[in-house]
Image (tube, helix red, strand yellow):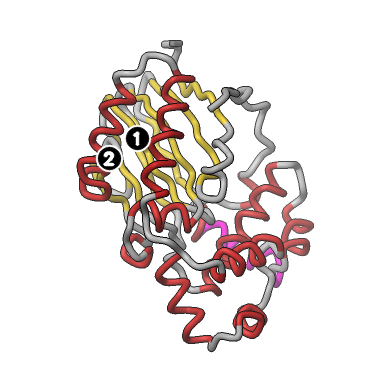
Amino acid sequence: MSVRPGPVMVEAVPSAALRPYVTRLCAYREHYAAPVTRSETAMPGAVLILAFGAPMEADGQRVTAFGGGLGDRFTVTRTAGPAEGVEVFLTPFGARRLYGLPMRHLTNRVVPVADLLGRWGELAVERLAATASWRGRLALADRLLRERIAAGPVLGPELPWAWARLLESGGRLAVSSLAESLGWSHRHLVARFHDQVGLPPKTAARVIRFGRALRLLRSGTAPAEAAAECGFYDQAHLNREFRVLGGTTPGQIRPRPGAVAGASWAP
């Protein structure tokens, strides 16, 4: 594996059985000459870090392997020593089944893997650390996650359907429309979102809208155009949301250079 300074990542497409629950699997290694502080943006999903090596600071805590739920604010991380592992991006429903907890208990939280997933999480990290190749780590992570999620609580189809509608609309679909389509009261819809997503539907839509604006800006869209396209009142509204949800401003977002090519492997 490379030991040059900076992050090195290889991505794999989750297996078909895992795709409703995991959107991305990434094996990584990072090592810097000096500590690096980042603002991790709010996103419409949860992140699980199955890491080993030097601990980092996340939301004021010193952690190595950790996870959590969705949030409506950015999180500050600080990386100092070398570390590596697998980063897992979960849908809200993947996180709900994996963790086995109502997602409202994990909103805006960073929780060590041992506390969040018990011995299963500790063993997963140990097995990943003992696997030499990145392809092997990605395949192992895929298999372990499939098994754990399959054994998790079964969720009905209503919330995944509602979530898909919010994603398709870029967060612009009215919450009242969702409740009416499902035949639910607004109060029941909010309660179900707290359990399976961790955020009320209006806040979840806000995070989705921010994510869409972020993607547009990274693709080169001007801030004023992105604000109009995503349904912000004006550019000032866009600026406020980026400060709260991203710890940055639209003007600081630049198109990203070409990413490292993803790995492919047969399950």
CA gap, disc 2 to disc 1? 8 Å
Q: Position of residue 168 (x, y in %)?
A: 70, 61
Label placed on residue 121 = 2
Give the dominant element type of the magenta stretch: helix, strand or loop. helix
Residue position for label 1: 50
Circles 2 and 1 in contact, beta carbons < 8 Å: yes
Range covered by the magenta-colored residues: 233-243
Residue 168 is left or right of residue 201, and the answer is right
- Can you tell which quarter of the image residue 264 is in? top right
Q: Position of residue 241 (x, y in %)?
A: 57, 63
The residue at 48%/57% (across/down) is: 92
Figure quadrant of the N terminus: top left
Q: Report the front residue among 122 and 31.
A: 122
Q: Report the front residue among 188 and 208.
A: 188
Give the amino acid type for the residue marked by disc 1 in the picture.
Answer: Leu
Give the amino acid type for the residue marked by disc 2 in the picture.
Answer: Gly
Q: Report the front residue among 228 and 182.
A: 182
> What crowding class fits label 2: few (fewer than 14 Cα within 10 Å), some (14-19), or many (20 or more)?
some
